[in-house]
Amino acid sequence: MFVELAFLATAVTTAALGYLAHRFLGALAVEAPRIHVELGSPKVSHYLWNDKLLVAFAQLILSRQYRVRLAAHPHSRAWASWLYLVHWLHLAALTWLIAAILKG
């Protein structure tokens, strides 16, 4: 039962991560095209599967550097805030899933 719930939580947070990444990257491309180009003009699939890009976003989002870099871009900053929250929820769901699998 716990494995199924942990898997469901992981699936939901993964879907939310993809949706929020799409919204964030869209807002970033419109509001801050220079930053968007600096990050390599990413798409959601690149964000989710490209290791180099993932590190750049992880640094920007998880360290909350987006608050400073996107201070003049309110929509991008708002989406980044939600992305920050869902990143941590996703990590928690993955941890829960691993623990549930190991517990058996």
Image (cartoon, rainbow, N blue to C red):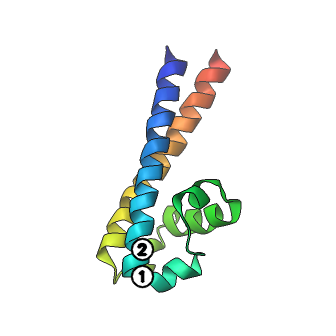
**In this view, 31 is above or below 19:** below
Residue on which the image places disc 2? 28
Kindly check if marks 1 and 2 are in contact, taking CB atoms under 8 A apart as contact.
yes
Q: Nearer the viewer, residue 96 or 16?
A: 16
Secondary-structure class at tag 1: loop
Q: How many numbered circles does the render carry? A: 2
Please tell me which residue is depicted at 49% across the width and 64% down the height of the picture: 61
Label 2 element class: helix
* Kind of residue indicated by mark 1: Ala
Q: From what the image shows, is residue 14 above or below residue 61?
A: above
Local crowd at mark 2 within 10 Å, few (<14), some, or many (≥20)? many
Residue 82, by quadrant, is bottom left
Which dot marks residue 32? 1
The amino acid marked with disc number 2 is Leu
Q: In this rendered view, identify the residue nearer to me: 52 or 104.
A: 52
> In percent of the image, x 52 and y 66: which residue is there?
63
Is 74 left or right of 13, judged from the image as shown?
Answer: left
Residue found farthest to the left: 74
The percent coordinates of residue 83 (x first, y second) are 42, 57
- The residue shown at (50%, 27%) is 6
Q: Sort mark 1 into few (<14), some (14-19) or many (20+) by Cα contacts within 10 Å.
A: some
Q: As displayed, is residue 29 above or below residue 19?
A: below
Q: Is residue 25 above or below residue 35?
A: above
